[in-house]
Image: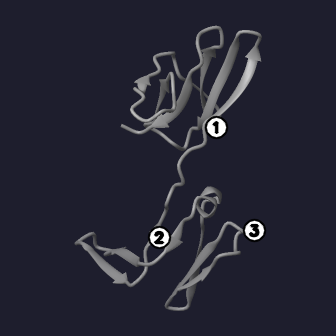
Amino acid sequence: MDYHPDGNVGTGSIIVTLDGQAVTLNLDPGHKQIGAHFNRFGIITTHIDGSGQTVYFDDLTYTIGLAPPTLTIAKTAPAEAFLEWPTNYTGFMVESALSLEAGSLWRPFTNVVTANGAVYGVSVSTTNTTRFFRLRKP
């Protein structure tokens, strides 16, 4: 087995050779960008007659460590802004607070969140008092 971090046009690939036959596994483009790495490996082989499987493990695994999502904001109208974050961060909710001081109360932001392609988004009125926003995974 050979790991090629620059294979598959820079996204990474693994070449496994068994009994002289090589198979290439191309890694997903986003995995390397979010810090994926290998430290264990396993193979499952199903028996031809269907009587079971043989499992082989080596000292190699593939794990992905996600950095926290980035919440962006853009003004979309004179009295409106739009918050966005990537859709590969599922399960996060927007919270708002009136201050960033210690002990500030963060509350769920109840406006409807939409998904549009690779981003989640939510509209925010800018006519109210100053508010701060964050993403939190409950």
Residue under circle 2?
62
Q: Position of residue 11 (x, y in %)?
A: 67, 66
Residue under circle 1?
118
Point out the frontmost of discs 3 and 1.
1
* Residue 109: assigned label: none
Closer to the chain start, of discs 3 and 2, is 3
Query: Are the residues tagged 3 and 2 within 8 Å (C-beta)?
Result: no
Image quarter for residue 13?
A: bottom right
Q: Position of residue 136 (x, y in %)?
A: 44, 37
Image quarter for residue 85?
A: top right
Q: Secondary structure at mark 2?
A: strand
Q: Residue at 71%, 9% (x, y): give it.
A: 79
Q: Position of residue 37 (x, y in %)?
A: 53, 71
Q: What sort of colour scheme is used for the picture?
A: one colour
Q: Secondary structure at mark 1?
A: loop
Closer to the chain start, of discs 3 and 1, is 3
> Callout 3, which amino acid?
Val
Q: Quadrant of the C terminus?
A: top left
Q: CA distance from mark 3 to mark 1?
A: 22 Å
